[in-house]
Image (spheres, rainbow, N blue to C red):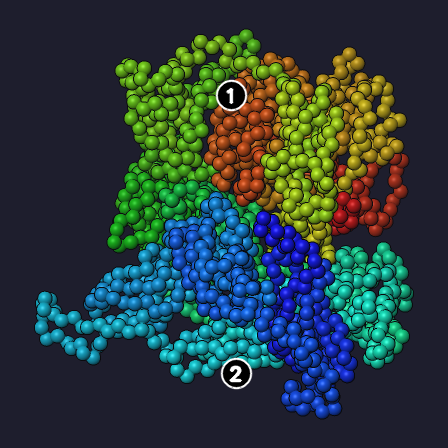
């Protein structure tokens, strides 16, 4: 009953207007100046039943001589407040009240006096004021008020910390002392206690327990891994006490303890959850106490080191901690590493010198970094007492000198600054006073000069800048602050030994503007604290803005008003970005608020669509100018007017230019304790702000780090006395109003001090530093390409060696080591070297001359004296390298080049087989070129410099006779002749050669290397020494021509294709080439080619497991040796699979298994370099078993299942990038006969309709709309459509869009007098949107502004109309739908030539430049119904223009719709009325976004006209070949689209049968959006399939078509697999020298997976293995392919695919071959001239038969330009892809190729620039 009454009583109290605690205690003024005062008071106590009501405070003010109190500030939630705008020389009284949310007001506090007079003492009242007016009445009637002040007061609690006891990892007990209150209120008003807690590093205290009556309490379920702080507070009815000092609960982190989110979820209670910490888990180094370690158990050579344990902050990620011990000896200048990876907090020091002193210190280390070291402890040896022993040192009674332990006393350390915040006082306007506590320096540091540094930060910027330095006092006056900005300040202390860590920052938050007049309440009382209108509120009108404020007529200052005045901080020169919204910012003060009016060029700005002006109550004026253009640049006049005056200011608006790095920073390699400097040059308009960062953290200057600016545009960061911790990524950030640009470089610090820095292989991405260009040569082991260094633009040669294991890397690594030892101008010098997982790259000096043989054959005359000259140069080179103990060991004509085209000095290249000759051991090398290798190399005996002299003899023999003396019919016979060494010079070949030459050969071509002449002796031979006396009779060049032709063919045949195979000469000598067990035959009846056992072998190959397939191609782990009785082994042996259990295997089977295993292993040993032949030999061993297993199944080709009735998604949604705030619309079009069930998912979670998400389902489609999308709406969206027959899915990534990242630095690959060919790399990220083009700017080296010169869509362009002999720089930015990227680093300085040399373009560069001028055709109109064949003429609807293809069976023309002017493709096929083309009937069925669309059909004059859409892009092969590199993700995107199209074809019962590159065409030249076309071979088949003729490009024909078996849906899967292999390897898997060999490779699955790029992902390899199955029934279905892991759009999968990047060199070679074999390329015009006279004629349309009148040269040039532009705008890729292959086309191509280069140059010279500008201005581009 009592409890019920008490509850009713509490409810009544809650309903009454109860004053929330009286009075507020301890009001005081803590800071003041002439115009402001800061008040502080004790917070009011609120009874427990009012806890839910928020309490605020109001300050009341009384001004003399008035006696009334008026509110000054309301709604204050803190217990401190600053009162500003006080009048000088006036006195005030202040008091505070508490106010509840419903308006209840507490009693006021006693008044606080604020007296200001001219006297120095601020507390002395002036005599002229009667202060009795302010006295309170404390008579008897007011005694109750006094009682409130003395008796009815809050409790007082001792400040002592509470006692804390841990009762386990999750329970603690607290105990505290009692609070004190007056005896009169002790019993009537009981005391309760509350416990407050906080989790460092948070600063907010929270109540976790309240209403406690005892003096102890136990807290349960606290988190066992989080640090806590607890304190106690006492309460009664009159208020709360101050809290006790906090007690801390410290949680040490164990070594093996990790952060676990599931573990945290068990402790989700209100006061201990991780979420309450409100701080993200950071990755920070550990914290180690700085206390000096201790040394114990010290002996002569040992000592035990102890230290305190480190900890990880509570807000940081928990990881294991290890320790590092560092040592310093007496003679060392710094500490060095002694031991790391220590887990314990003690370590035994061993191996110490008993007579040496040491210092030790400790660091803590995690994966996120190291802590600061501890202070050092010293181990001092008393050397004075150590006497030189006079006895034998080996005696056991030898006394070891005693060691004395003392703490280290270093010469000096930086000071230590308290972490407490600086104090801000006297804050008024833009001025304030900073004060801070003194820093401290250890007592052992003598003579330290202590100074302070003040740092400032302006939020939201994160950069700290130095405000003041070298301060001696502990205070500093800050002036000139902007009253409208917020600031943060912190302090550092420094001395001559370094700077301390900064203090915690203090903040200045300006909540209102100093010039805002007071805001009045409804009662006309002035509120000068918090204005009613917030800082961000504003009043807006189109162009004129004003505000009316009512004034207190009793106030003279506001009655008089203030004229307008613009603030002095206004910048009269401001900037805007072209194409974006520009903003002019001003600030004005005046009362009343002035009316603002803007004018530009004398006109008022009245266009609301162009201009928008705003003024805030604080006087901030903004003028927005939308879509800034050059016409908007100029002077803007702003007029401010009110009743008291008028003010005008003129602001100059200029366009801003984003920062550009003229010279970027470069990577730097430094030895420890050395110095270096990062330097860069940057410009921009306005000049950008520069800041330096290290590993994403800002850099501030220290004694070792100095930032320097050398005008006008050079910046440098100097690093002195570097250490290993200085290693990292250093970034220079340049930023202005137009954008931001960065330049990053790495610093590598080597702890080992070396005298010289040698080039070594570094693990970095080669393409990040160099542009790989055309191939210069290809040998057995590597490929040489011309490359351009990105940072300097210099040309070099790069030798790229595929090396997939450590053995190959070690073998070929000798070349770099030996080149570093050679110092000879005739040997290419090494520039750089790179090493990756599967490749070595050596960058060397570029040799630009011809090979020696080519140079000889280009001469009109060749004599013996000329031969002597070159042999002499070769001997001089060998003498030099032999002196360096290097032997070349591979001297041959193809390794000797001329230095330059106009020089006769030779260079000796290719040191891949060179070896360093050592006197300590014998060097053997059983490798070389068969014709030029020495006998000792073949015999695998010791090689030496004499081995090179044998090769010199062979080379000399060839130069004099043109004949290779020891060449046999094959390699084995050649090696045998070399070993015999029998050489008999033919009289016929040497009839014009001197006797000295024959003697010279005889001295060199000796089998015993000891009998050969050395290089030095050869130079003294009479044939060399008396070279001038040799005859000038011409030598016959005929044999040399034959030798060169044979050598070129031989080198091409043995050139590298994938991974280099090292064939030792011994194995070549003894090699017997295995022969495949398969042979082809002809059918006697039909005459067709037959392939015996191909089906059986196909089943055998398809049974190969994924593990064995990898192992066969060396892409997986090696095979394990397992007992024969294990089932796993027999399951892995090909051809030995069985369904029986191993327990059923009898002894006979085991013996047979052993025999087969032995035979298979022997087959492996016979031929190990050809995995395909190895598999065939293995099959030969087990063929009988395979055939016997297959006899039971007569049907080796199971029928394909009938096509399913799954729902089809005709049009799917695709990857989408959006801007937050816009709508996301995802749409799918369905082909289904029944109402579908549609489900949408995002990141595999069901999407439901809400206020922003709408889902619409119709009979033919579904639509998902996300209104006003947020960033968290991004993800992977998937639509699942279900019906009775099955389901269909569509998935795509929806991501937040952004501008692209910065493109790479452009370089000039060719330079003429007026043109430059530029090349660059695309951005690393595209902002989740396709790159639509680039903008190229140019600037003269002495110029001030950049000029836009080109808008290409690819990563190259020709810049024209340059001035001869002038220096230029270029920069590039990328464009996507979201805007422009940051500018690239400016190109190296390029100087144009003086004369008129033209740029020579290779085929692909010409093609890229020509295709950039194409226009985007108008989109095709939707089809209004099914297409019907019309019998009759088409001339009323279409107009046929030029022919783009003409073949034996068809031709393709451009058809223009007469009414709509849209372009289409018209394929013309001869056809009778009784026999309509199958292609037309199939195209009528097509209605899918990935299949070309049919628009019309006509049958006229025995010809069928098929009208289809005209595609703008190129075929898929050309699209990738045009790029410099492409990623595996791009291939996956294309293949997924192809498979979606194939899935639809199979759905309607159609098999394409001709999927090849020309059948897959890009819809756009910029986007990866493809369509399937070329249906000339397509068939509509049933589920059983049918036999089809063997037609099409041979490489892409399925094996069942070649063998004339049934073809069905799985046939298309094979062709998709071949296309995948092509794009993932750059070559066709079955390509051979003839069609018959190609068919043989297809039928017997002879493809080499080594051809695949080395860095393709494992998922891609698995996909290739599963799709390229020989037997159709073993292949994946199209649905399985689409569900394969490799083609999914998950973030991890996409990221992995994007990291695999391939170059296009191999792909371009195949594209050339593909074109030459009859597939016309897009880059070739339809007709090309044979003479220069026809160049202009090709560009003129010949529609009129009348003769065109003669025109002037200018008119002809103008018309040619216009017509070439028109021709190049037309893209014939789609229609060409539909053409049939024919011999006629091949003959036509041969004639076209001869003059192609001339026409392309003509097109590039006359059209490219104009067309690029038009393309950039088009709507689609923008």
Q: In this view of the protein, which residue sits in the foreground, 63 or 943?
A: 63
Where is residue 70, by image quadrant? Answer: bottom right
Q: Which numbered disc, 1 or 2, marks the residue that appears first in the sequence? A: 2
Q: CA distance from mark 1 to mark 2?
A: 85 Å
Which label belongs to residue 1674?
1
- Judging from the image, what secondary structure is the residue with disc 1 in? helix
- Give the mark toward the camera: 1 or 2: 2
Which label belongs to residue 1089?
none
State whether residue 315 is above or below residue 1740.
below
Q: In this view of the protein, which residue sits in the foreground, 429 or 1626?
A: 429
**Which residue is situated farthest in the front direction here?**
1
Where is residue 349, by image quadrant? Answer: bottom left
Number of disc labels? 2
Q: In this view of the protein, which residue sits in the foreground, 603 or 530?
A: 530
For disc 2, the marked residue is: 472
Q: Residue at x 58, y 80 (%)?
A: 476
Q: In this view of the protein, which residue sits in the foreground, 771 or 786?
A: 771
State whether residue 6 is above or below residue 231.
above
Task: Tell me if 1679 is positioned left or right of 1175 in this view.
Answer: right
Where is residue 938, by image quadrant? Answer: top left
Can residue 749 be seen in the rendering of this structure? no
Label 2 CA crowd tier, 10 Å (few <14, some 14–19, many 20+): few
Q: Residue at x 66, y 22 (%)?
A: 1283
């Amino acid at each position: 009953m009592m409890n019920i009454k008490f509850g009713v009583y509490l409810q009544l109290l809650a309903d009454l207007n109860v004053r929330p605690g009286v009075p507020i205690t301890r009001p005081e003024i803590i800071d003041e100046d002439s115009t402001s005062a800061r008040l502080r008071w004790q917070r009011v106590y609120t009874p427990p039943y009012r806890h839910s009501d928020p309490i605020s405070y109001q300050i009341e003010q009384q001004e003399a001589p008035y006696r009334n109190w008026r509110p000054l500030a309301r709604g204050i939630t803190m217990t401190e407040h600053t009162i500003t705008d006080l009048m000088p020389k006036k006195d005030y009284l202040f008091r505070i009240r508490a106010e509840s949310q419903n308006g209840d007001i507490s009693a006021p506090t006693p008044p606080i006096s604020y007296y200001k007079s001219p006297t120095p003492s601020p507390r002395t009242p002036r005599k002229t004021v009667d202060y009795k007016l302010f006295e309170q009445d404390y008579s008897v009637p007011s005694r109750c008020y006094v009682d409130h002040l003395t008796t009815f007061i809050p409790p007082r609690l001792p400040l002592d910390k509470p006692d804390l006891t841990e009762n386990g990892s999750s329970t603690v007990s607290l105990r505290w002392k009692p609070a004190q209150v007056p005896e009169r209120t002790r019993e009537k008003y009981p005391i309760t206690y509350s416990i407050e807690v906080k989790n460092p590093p948070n600063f907010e205290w929270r109540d976790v327990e309240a209403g406690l009556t005892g003096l102890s309490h136990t807290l349960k379920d606290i988190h066992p891994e989080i640090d806590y702080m607890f304190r106690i507070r006492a309460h009664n009815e009159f208020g709360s006490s101050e809290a006790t000092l906090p007690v801390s609960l410290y949680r040490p982190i164990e070594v093996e303890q990790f952060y676990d989110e599931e573990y945290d979820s068990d402790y989700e209670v209100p006061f201990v959850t991780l979420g309450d910490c409100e701080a993200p888990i950071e990755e920070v180094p550990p914290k180690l106490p700085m206390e000096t370690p201790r040394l114990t158990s010290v002996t002569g050579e040992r000592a035990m080191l102890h230290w305190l344990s480190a900890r990880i902050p509570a807000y940081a990620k928990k990881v294991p901690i290890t320790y590092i011990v560092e040592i310093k000896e007496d003679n060392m200048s710094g500490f060095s590493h002694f031991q790391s990876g220590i887990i314990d907090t003690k370590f035994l020091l061993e191996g110490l010198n008993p007579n040496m002193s040491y210092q030790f210190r400790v660091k803590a280390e995690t994966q996120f970094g190291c802590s600061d070291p501890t202070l050092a402890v010293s181990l001092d040896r008393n050397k004075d007492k150590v006497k030189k022993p006079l006895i034998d040192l080996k005696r056991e009674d030898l006394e070891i000198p005693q060691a004395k332990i003392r703490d280290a006393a270093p010469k000096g350390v930086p000071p230590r600054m308290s972490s407490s915040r600086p104090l801000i006082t006297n804050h008024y306007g833009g001025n304030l006073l900073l004060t801070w506590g003194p820093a401290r320096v250890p007592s052992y540091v003598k003579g330290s000069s202590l100074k302070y540094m003040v740092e400032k930060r302006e939020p939201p910027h994160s950069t700290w800048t130095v405000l003041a330095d070298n301060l001696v006092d502990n205070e500093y006056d800050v002036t000139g602050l902007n009253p409208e900005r917020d600031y943060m300040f912190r302090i550092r202390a420094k001395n001559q030994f370094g700077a301390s860590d900064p203090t915690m920052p203090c903040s200045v938050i300006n909540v209102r503007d100093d010039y805002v007049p007071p805001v009045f309440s409804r009662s006309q009382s002035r509120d000068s604290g918090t204005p009613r209108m917030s800082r961000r509120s504003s009043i807006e009108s189109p162009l004129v803005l004003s505000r009316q404020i009512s004034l207190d007529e009793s106030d003279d200052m506001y009655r008089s008003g203030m004229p307008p005045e613009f603030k002095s901080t206004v910048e009269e020169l401001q900037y805007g970005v072209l194409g974006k919204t520009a903003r002019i910012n001003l600030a004005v003060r005046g009362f009343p608020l002035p009316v603002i009016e803007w004018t530009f060029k004398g006109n008022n700005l009245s266009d609301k669509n162009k201009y928008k002006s705003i003024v805030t109550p604080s006087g901030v004026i903004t003028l927005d100018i939308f879509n800034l253009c050059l016409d908007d640049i100029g002077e803007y006049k702003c007029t401010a007017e009110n009743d008291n005056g008028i003010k005008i200011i003129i602001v100059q608006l200029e366009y801003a230019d984003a920062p550009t790095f003229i010279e970027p920073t470069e990577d730097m390699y430094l030895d420890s304790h050395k110095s270096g400097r990062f330097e860069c040059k940057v410009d921009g308009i306005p000049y950008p702000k520069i800041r330096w960062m290290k590993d994403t953290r800002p850099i501030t200057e220290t004694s070792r780090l100095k930032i320097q600016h050398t005008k006008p545009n050079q910046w440098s960061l100097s690093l002195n006395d570097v250490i290993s911790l200085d290693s990292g990524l250093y970034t220079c950030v340049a930023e202005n109003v137009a954008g931001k640009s960065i330049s990053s470089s790495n610093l590598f610090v080597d702890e080992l001090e070396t005298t010289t820095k040698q080039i070594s292989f570094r693990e970095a991405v080669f393409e990040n530093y160099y542009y790989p260009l055309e191939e210069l040569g290809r040998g057995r082991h590597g490929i040489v390409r011309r490359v351009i260094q990105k940072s300097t633009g210099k040309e070099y040669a790069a030798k790229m060696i595929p090396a997939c294991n450590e053995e190959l890397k070690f073998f070929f690594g000798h070349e770099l080591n030996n080149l570093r030892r050679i110092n000879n101008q005739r040997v290419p010098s090494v520039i750089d070297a790179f090493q990756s997982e599967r490749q070595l790259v050596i960058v060397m000096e570029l040799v630009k001359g011809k090979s020696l043989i080519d140079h000889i054959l280009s001469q009109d005359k060749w004599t013996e004296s000329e031969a002597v000259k070159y042999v002499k140069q070769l001997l001089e080179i060998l003498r030099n390298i032999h002196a360096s103990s290097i032997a070349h060991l591979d001297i041959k004509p193809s390794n000797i080049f001329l230095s330059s085209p106009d020089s006769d000095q030779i260079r000796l290249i290719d040191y891949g087989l060179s070896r360093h000759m050592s006197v300590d051991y014998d060097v053997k090398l059983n490798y070389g070129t068969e014709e030029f290798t020495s006998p000792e190399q073949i015999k695998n005996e010791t090689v030496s410099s004499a081995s090179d002299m044998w090769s010199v003899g062979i080379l000399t023999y060839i130069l004099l006779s043109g004949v290779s003396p020891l060449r046999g019919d094959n390699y084995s016979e050649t090696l045998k002749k070399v070993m015999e060494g029998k050489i008999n010079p033919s009289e016929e070949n040497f009839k014009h050669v001197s006797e000295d030459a024959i003697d010279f050969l005889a001295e060199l071509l000796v089998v015993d290397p000891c009998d050969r002449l050395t290089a030095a002796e050869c130079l003294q031979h009479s044939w060399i020494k008396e070279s001038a006396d040799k005859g000038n009779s011409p030598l016959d060049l005929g044999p040399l021509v034959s030798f060169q032709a044979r050598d070129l063919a031989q080198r091409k045949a043995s050139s590298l294709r994938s991974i280099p195979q090292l064939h030792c000469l011994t194995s070549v000598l003894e090699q017997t080439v295995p022969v495949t067990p398969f042979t082809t035959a002809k059918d006697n009846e039909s005459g067709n080619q037959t392939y015996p056992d191909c089906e059986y072998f196909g089943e055998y190959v398809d049974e190969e497991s994924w593990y064995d397939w990898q192992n066969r191609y060396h892409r997986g782990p090696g095979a394990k040796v397992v007992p024969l009785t294990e089932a796993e082994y027999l399951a892995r042996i090909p051809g030995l699979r069985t369904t029986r259990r191993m327990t059923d295997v009898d002894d006979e089977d085991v013996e047979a298994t052993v025999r087969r295993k032995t035979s298979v292993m022997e087959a492996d040993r016979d031929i190990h370099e050809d995995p395909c032949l190895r598999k065939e030999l293995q099959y030969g061993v087990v063929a009988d078993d395979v055939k016997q297993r297959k006899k039971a199944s007569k049907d080796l080709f199971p029928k394909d299942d009938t096509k399913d009735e799954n729902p089809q998604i005709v049009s799917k949604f695709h990857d989408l990038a959006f801007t937050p705030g816009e709508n996301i619309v995802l749409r799918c079009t369905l082909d289904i006969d029944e109402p579908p069930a549609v489900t949408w998912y995002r990141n595999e979670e069901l999407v439901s309709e809400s206020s922003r998400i709408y889902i619409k389902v119709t009979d033919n489609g579904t639509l998902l709309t996300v209104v006003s999308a947020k960033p968290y709406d991004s993800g992977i969206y998937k639509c699942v459509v279900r019906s009775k027959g099955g389901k269909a899915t569509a998935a795509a990534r929806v991501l937040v869009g952004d501008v692209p990242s910065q493109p790479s630095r452009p370089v000039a690959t060719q330079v003429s007098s007026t043109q430059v060919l530029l090349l660059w790399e695309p951005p690393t990220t595209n902002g989740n949107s396709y790159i639509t083009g680039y903008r190229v700017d140019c600037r003269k080296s002495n110029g001030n502004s950049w000029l836009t010169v080109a808008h290409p869509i690819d990563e190259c362009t020709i810049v024209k109309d340059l001035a001869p002999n002038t220096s230029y720089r270029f920069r590039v930015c990328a464009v996507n739908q979201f805007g422009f990227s940051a500018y690239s680093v400016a190109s190296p300085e390029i100087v144009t030539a003086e004369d008129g040399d033209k740029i020579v373009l290779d085929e692909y560069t010409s093609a890229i430049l020509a295709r950039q001028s194409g226009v985007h055709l108008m989109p095709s109109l939707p089809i209004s119904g099914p297409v019907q064949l019309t019998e009759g003429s088409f001339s009323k609807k279409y107009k046929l223009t030029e022919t783009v293809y003409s073949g034996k069976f068809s031709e393709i023309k451009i058809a223009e719709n007469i009414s709509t002017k849209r372009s289409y493709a018209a394929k013309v096929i001869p056809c009778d009325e009784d026999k309509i083309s199958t292609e037309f009937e199939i195209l009528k069925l097509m209605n899918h976004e990935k299949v070309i669309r049919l628009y019309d059909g006509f049958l006229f004059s025995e010809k069928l006209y098929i009208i289809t859409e005209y595609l703008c892009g190129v075929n898929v092969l050309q699209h990738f070949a045009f790029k410099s590199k492409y990623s595996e993700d791009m291939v996956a995107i294309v293949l997924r689209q192809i498979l979606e199209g194939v899935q639809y074809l199979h759905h309607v019962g159609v098999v394409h049968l001709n999927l090849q590159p020309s059948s897959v065409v890009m819809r756009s030249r910029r986007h990866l959006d493809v369509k399937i076309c070329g249906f000339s071979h397509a068939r509509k088949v049933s589920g059983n399939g049918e036999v089809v003729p063997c037609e099409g490009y041979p490489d892409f024909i399925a094996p069942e078509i070649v063998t004339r078996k049934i073809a069905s849906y799985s046939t298309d899967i094979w062709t998709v697999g071949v296309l995948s292999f092509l794009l993932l390897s750059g070559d066709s898997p079955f390509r051979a020298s003839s069609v018959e060999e190609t068919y043989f490779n297809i039928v017997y699955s002879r493809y080499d997976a080594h051809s695949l790029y080395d860095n393709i992902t494992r998922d891609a390899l698995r996909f290739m293995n599963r799709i390229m199955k020989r037997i159709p029934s073993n292949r994946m279905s199209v649905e399985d392919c689409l569900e394969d892991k490799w083609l999914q759009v998950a973030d991890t999968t996409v990221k992995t695919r994007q990291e695999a990047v391939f170059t296009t060199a191999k792909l371009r070679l195949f594209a050339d071959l593909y074109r030459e074999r009859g597939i016309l390329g897009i880059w070739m015009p339809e007709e090309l001239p044979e003479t220069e006279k026809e160049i202009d004629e090709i560009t003129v349309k010949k529609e009129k038969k009348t003769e065109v009148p003669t025109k002037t040269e200018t008119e002809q040039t103008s018309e040619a330009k216009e017509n070439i532009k028109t021709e190049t705008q037309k893209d014939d890729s789609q229609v060409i892809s539909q053409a049939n292959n024919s011999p006629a086309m091949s003959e036509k191509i041969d004639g076209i190729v001869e003059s192609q280069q001339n026409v392309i140059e003509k097109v590039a010279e006359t059209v490219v620039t104009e067309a690029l500008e038009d393309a950039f201005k088009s709507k689609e581009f923008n």
